Structure formats: structure tokens, C-alpha cells
């Protein structure tokens, strides 16, 4: 088996109390998976039928490799199901959003009805500015309720939102605005981080230079004295909501109309604009929130991600609101003012479902158990993890210290492209540290060799999805060729780009990326984007970056740089380059180490062989994984 490798697996398992499964929406894994296998279309139709549609579908699924269409002919609006559906029922005054800022007492609460009124006004304001169905709107905001309002307002009128994480710098924002041809940029004067103000609007000012598509910048002004708005192009978030109707009929969307674009790192220079649609994405995020997170009426759901990532789209905004949950959002950093803040928030707000990233868990392990022990975490019912492999040590700690050896851990594997959870151990099933689990009912996944043949248990291979699913990406914006590549590497399957291994029970352990992507603290960075930022510095001739293991962040960026003639290596230049990357891409992309080198290993065609650098760095033989590289 040339394309595979042996992996050592331990066999520890933890089984939550029976009542977890007995009381869960999904019930046992095997019968649920069997229901799906018996009739996949009926399975998805049943779930879709729990939501409201303006017109029913003609076909559940149309699949012509590599293109899938879901709920064809159906009409809907996701905000109808996130807002109107609840308001028309008994949930009118149920709390939809709780926001907690950095300062104690910095709190805001919005009921479903209050949230809806804000959304509809803001939607009308956008319309008045000439935003119409299909137009792109870029959102670059801190995690405040207005962020959620902006997202839902776009969806209300059929505008396609493109959210850019507030930690990104001007260059990254500019690329994303230009690629999507955004008409509007919605931002805030500042974000707040560790007691300091981060000037977002200043970054937007820089990012809209040579972005001719932008007609207006809408600014949420949080601080006093108010930031001055200069041109007619700049508008105040609340002023534009003043003289508009509080009623805004939802735009009737085709199930296959685009809902949003979200950029994710690619291996080529520009990031990929992943396109998700109204109907399938709605069904996928609703299903996973209700049946995988097992969302109940009384749950308080806290996902610590940011709406700038897919995790925030699917499990802060759309999924939980579709399921009618109470959603906690916070503009907090895990260790400010002290490393107890998150546990304190769980106690204060009675959080029941907590969803975070392995990098955060590893950071808390370092701070010590005394911090979570100061607080009462008994409200927690289910705890989750996403973004990178949850290593067994982190699993054990999370299970014991946070979950008090009772809460099921959902280690959820999925991607920006998949839109929804794909692999995890469903509530109540035995959990195995290090393993994400099995494909959820509705998903057919496997570990295969390069020819697409399933590899035997304990042998590593490539992770593929064998059948289309409702929340899958439909294309890459402006680059359908790139979309087809996902399905053409090992046809007819979708290749995720991850290496994985199964055990005898079909549990899947995800080992990491097979391609040129580095995951820093759960943030997905393309090597190419970081390299081009480095090369844009006057001193740099060529650069290559790799991910190196980091105890807290999972991976850290290490850069190898060839200097132009006339420049000398120095510590000062290292810090200049680090700063330069920080300014163009944001702090997450900052190299942890820079090494000046006279040359870089390349293929004959001139492609930099990052895995050779990586092998050298880690002192391993570069040959042993070569056949698995994409
Ligand atoms: C990549 C996707 C899905 C939201 C966050 C990241 C890695 C994600 C897990 C997990 C092991 C994981 C994979 C995947 N990943 N979740 N539970 N176990 N690896 O979204 O930026 O699109 O990154 O994150 O490598 O391919 P993304």
C-alpha cells in the first residue's frame, strides 16, 4: 500500500450516562444512520419539513458530478426561519442574544422580537442605499449584537454577505472586498481587546483604496466623542435606521440562490470565496444544531468563535437562531482580565452548551485547573471542540476539568466548505480521545488511498466525503475550476485535504492537512498568502513558510527568507518583517520564527517544496510522507 502509512492508536473510551442518549433528539447513532441509509432523500426531506418554506421543493437533491442542487424549486428565506417563525409562535419574547463585553456589567439582551425589529430596520436601510438581491456586502465588525443584525439584514433582502474577520489587516480586507465586488462595507469605529481599542475604521479606510465597487461605508460608532464621518460615502449605523419602516417582507429566495461568500485560505495567491446557498445551508445548520448539538428549549449556547469564521456563521448565528436557542456572544479574550473569565461567564449566564477550539483548551491547561475550579460549571451539559485535532491530553483535561467527567464532548470535524458538522461522536455514544468520531447520520465519509479505495483500519489515508450533502459549497466565487478540483482529485468523491485514519469501529482520527495550509490557533492560513506578504517587503527576494508544532497554538508559522542583494540578515530586520506581515494580514499570520537562508528547496518546475523544509525542521525523513502529499 504505497499511499498509506501505519498509525499507532490507543483504545481508551468514555461513555456518557445513558440518559444523555435517551433524551436526545437524535437517539442512538446506529438506528439514525440506518434511517438515513434506508432513504437518504426522505431523511433530508423530513428535516427540511421542520422548517417553513414559501414553496415546497420538487426534488430533494439533483446530483450531476461535481454539481449538486438541493431542494430544487423551493422558495425560502433563512431569516423567516431564524426570526419570524419564532416570533409568530410562543418564542416572541424568548431571549435570542445575550452579549457580554469585556467590562463587567457590559451586557445587552435582545429577545427574538427585539432582534427582528433591528434586523428589519437595518434591512430597509440597506435597501434605501440601493442594495438589492445578489449584491455583495462586506461585514468587518467586532463581536457585538449589531454584527448579527447586519448579517441577518443582508439575508433578509437577499444580499450576499462576505464577513471578514476583524483580526485581518488592510491588505487581506482589500483582497476580499475586491474579489466579491462589495458595494457596502459595514464596520465599527473600534473593536475592544484587552482593554484597548482596535481602530477598525482606520483599517477599512486603507482597504477601500482602489476598491471601486464600494459605494458606502456604514460605521457603528461605539465610543465618545463620536468618530467623525467625512464624506457622503460614510454613514452612521443607527442614523440610517431612523427614518425607515420597521416592517420588511423577506425577499423570496430560491433554495439555490447564494446566501453568503466566505473567504478561506487557498494554496494559490488569492483566498477562495466559498459560496453557500439559502436552502441547503439552512437545512444543514438547522439539522446539526438541533440533532448534533442536541439543542433543547432551555439551552444557552456559547460558541467562542467569531462570525468571521464559518464556525461563527453556522453555530453563532444561523444554526442556533434557526433552532430558536438563546445565544451568548462575547467580545472577550480568554485570559483578560484573568484566565478565569470564560468560566465566570459560564457561571454567570448558565451556559449549557459550550463550543470552543483545541488551542483555547491547551492554553487553559497551561494556566492551571485553579481557574475553572473557582467557578460553578454545573450548568454545562454538552461541550464541543472544533478547528483542529483535539489531542488526547487536551480531551482528557476538557472532559475532566470542564465537563466534570459527565458531559459528552463533541469533537466536530468539518470545514468552511462543508458548512456544517460532518464527523463527530454523537451525544451519548462512547467517545475515544483523539478521534473525532463517525460520520454523522446524513454524511458518508471514508479514509481512502489515492485511487479512492478504502484503506483498512489503522492505516492512514485521505479523508473523503462520498455523497453530496445539503450545506456543501456550491462553487468558489469567480473560480469554478477550483471548485471542481475538490471533486476531481479522487472522483467521484469530495477530497477534504486532510489525512486521517479509522479504527475497527469506524471512528475517524483526523491527523492534519495534506496540503499547504497552516492552522494557527484554529485559524486557517494559506502559506501563499503569508509568503506574498513577506515578498511584498523591499528586503525580501523569496520566502517560504511552514507550520511547526506549537504546544498552545497547535501550529505556528515559521518563515524561511532569501534576502535581496544589498540587505543583511539582522534581528532588526526579523522584527521589521514580522511587523510587516502583521500589518498586511493581521496578528494571526505573524511568523513565530524567521530564518534567513541562501536558497530554498524546489521542484524542477520551480515549486517550493515546503515539506522538505518541514521535514528538516522536525528532523524527520522527508521521503516517508511524500506519496501522500497533494
Ligand atoms: C480544517 C478546516 C470548521 C470550522 C473551523 C475550521 C481542521 C476542523 C477539526 C477537528 C481535526 C479539524 C481540518 C479541516 N479541522 N475541525 N475536529 N479535528 N481537524 O474551518 O478554516 O475551513 O478549516 O480544519 O484540517 O480541514 P476551516
Image (tube, rainbow, N blue to C red):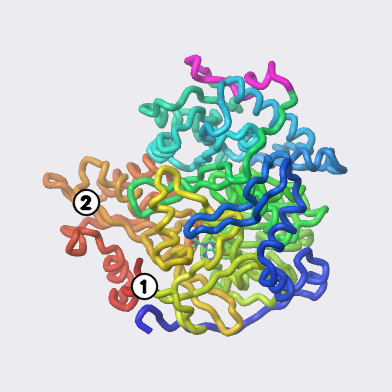
- Circle 1 or circle 2, nearest the eye: 1
Q: Is residue 523 left or right of residue 381?
A: left
Tell me, yes or no, whether the two marked residues, 1 and 2, touch with CB atoms within 8 Å: no
Q: Is residue 183 above or below residue 55?
A: above
Q: Residue at point 26% right, 50% down?
A: 571
> Which secondary structure dominates the residues rendered in magenta?
loop
Q: Residue 553 in the image: x percent, y percent?
A: 48, 60
Magenta-drawn stretch contains 114? no
Task: State the image quarter where residue 420 is shown.
Answer: bottom right
Q: Which mark is residue 542?
A: 2
Q: Is residue 249 above or below residue 298?
A: above
Q: Residue at point 45% right, 58% down?
A: 519
Question: Farthest residue toward the left?
Answer: 565
Residue range (magenta)? 228-245
Q: Which residue is mark 1?
A: 628
SS at badge 1: helix
Q: Nearer the viewer, residue 94 or 583?
A: 94
Can the viewer see residue 363? no
Q: Is residue 123 left or right of residue 87?
A: left
Amino acid at each position: 500500500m504505497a499511499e498509506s502509512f501505519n498509525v499507532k492508536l490507543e483504545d481508551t473510551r468514555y461513555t456518557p450516562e445513558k440518559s444523555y442518549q435517551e433524551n436526545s433528539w437524535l437517539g442512538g447513532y446506529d438506528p439514525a444512520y440506518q434511517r438515513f441509509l434506508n432513504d437518504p432523500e426522505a431523511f433530508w426531506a423530513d428535516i427540511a419539513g421542520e422548517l417553513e418554506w414559501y414553496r415546497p421543493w420538487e426534488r430533494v437533491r439533483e446530483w450531476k458530478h461535481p454539481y449538486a442542487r438541493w431542494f430544487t424549486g423551493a422558495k425560502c428565506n433563512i431569516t423567516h426561519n431564524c426570526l419570524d417563525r419564532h416570533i409568530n409562535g410562543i418564542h416572541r419574547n424568548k431571549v435570542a442574544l445575550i452579549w457580554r463585553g469585556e467590562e463587567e456589567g457590559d451586557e445587552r439582551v435582545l429577545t427574538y422580537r427585539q432582534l427582528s425589529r433591528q434586523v428589519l430596520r437595518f434591512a430597509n436601510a440597506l435597501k434605501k442605499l440601493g442594495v438589492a438581491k445578489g449584491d455583495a456586502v462586506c461585514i468587518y465588525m467586532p463581536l457585538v449584537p449589531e454584527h448579527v443584525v447586519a448579517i441577518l439584514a443582508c439575508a433578509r433582502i437577499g444580499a450576499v454577505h462576505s464577513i471578514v474577520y476583524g483580526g485581518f489587516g488592510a491588505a487581506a480586507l482589500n483582497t476580499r472586498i475586491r474579489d466579491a465586488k462589495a458595494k457596502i462595507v459595514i464596520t465599527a469605529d473600534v473593536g475592544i481587546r484587552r482593554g484597548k481599542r482596535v481602530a477598525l475604521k482606520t483599517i477599512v479606510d486603507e482597504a477601500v483604496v482602489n476598491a471601486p465597487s464600494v459605494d458606502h461605508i456604514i460605521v457603528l460608532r461605539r465610543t465618545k466623542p463620536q468618530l467623525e464621518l467625512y464624506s457622503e460615502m460614510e454613514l452612521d449605523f443607527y442614523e440610517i435606521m431612523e427614518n425607515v419602516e420597521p416592517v420588511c417582507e423577506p425577499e423570496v429566495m430560491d433554495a439555490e440562490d447564494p446566501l453568503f461568500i466566505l473567504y478561506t485560505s487557498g494554496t494559490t495567491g488569492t483566498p477562495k470565496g466559498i459560496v453557500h446557498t439559502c436552502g441547503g445551508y439552512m437545512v444543514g445548520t438547522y439539522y446539526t444544531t438541533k440533532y448534533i448539538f442536541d439543542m433543547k428549549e432551555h439551552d444557552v449556547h456559547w460558541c467562542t468563535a467569531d462570525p468571521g469564521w464559518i464556525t461563527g456563521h453556522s453555530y453563532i448565528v444561523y444554526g442556533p437562531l434557526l433552532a430558536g436557542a438563546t445565544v451568548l456572544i462575547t467580545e472577550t479574550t480568554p485570559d483578560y482580565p484573568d484566565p478565569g473569565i470564560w468560566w465566570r461567564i459560564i457561571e454567570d449566564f448558565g451556559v449549557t452548551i459550550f463550543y470552543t477550539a483545541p488551542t483555547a483548551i491547551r492554553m487553559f491547561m497551561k494556566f492551571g485547573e485553579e481557574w475553572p475550579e473557582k467557578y460553578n460549571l454545573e450548568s454545562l451539559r454538552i461541550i464541543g471542540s472544533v478547528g483542529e485535532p483535539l489531542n488526547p491530553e487536551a480531551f482528557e483535561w476538557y472532559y475532566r476539568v470542564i465537563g466534570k467527567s459527565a458531559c459528552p464532548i463533541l469533537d466536530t470535524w468539518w470545514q468552511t466548505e462543508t458548512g456544517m458538522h460532518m464527523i463527530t461522536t454523537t451525544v451519548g455514544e462512547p467517545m475515544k480521545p483523539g478521534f473525532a468520531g463517525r460520520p454523522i447520520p446524513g454524511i458518508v465519509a471514508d479514509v481512502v488511498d489515492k485511487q479512492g479505495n478504502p484503506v483498512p483500519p489503522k492505516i492512514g489515508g485521505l479523508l473523503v466525503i462520498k455523497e453530496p450533502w445539503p450545506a456543501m459549497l456550491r462553487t468558489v466565487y469567480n473560480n469554478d475550476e477550483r471548485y471542481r478540483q475538490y471533486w476531481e482529485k479522487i472522483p467521484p468523491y469530495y477530497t477534504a485535504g486532510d489525512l486521517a485514519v479509522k479504527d475497527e469501529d469506524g471512528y475517524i482520527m483526523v491527523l492534519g492537512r495534506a496540503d499547504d495550509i497552516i492552522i494557527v490557533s484554529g485559524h486557517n492560513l494559506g502559506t501563499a498568502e503569508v509568503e506574498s506578504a513577506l515578498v511584498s517587503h523591499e528586503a525580501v527576494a523569496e520566502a517560504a513558510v511552514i507550520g511547526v508544532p506549537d504546544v498552545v497554538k497547535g501550529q505556528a508559522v515559521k518563515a524561511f527568507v532569501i534576502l535581496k542583494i544589498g540587505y543583511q540578515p539582522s534581528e532588526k530586520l526579523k522584527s521589521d518583517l514580522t511587523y510587516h506581515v502583521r500589518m498586511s494580514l493581521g496578528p494571526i499570520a505573524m511568523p513565530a520564527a524567521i530564518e534567513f537562508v541562501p536558497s530554498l528547496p524546489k521542484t524542477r518546475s520551480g515549486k517550493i517544496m515546503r515539506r522538505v523544509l518541514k521535514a528538516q525542521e522536525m528532523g524527520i525523513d522527508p521521503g516517508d510522507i511524500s506519496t501522500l502529499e497533494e
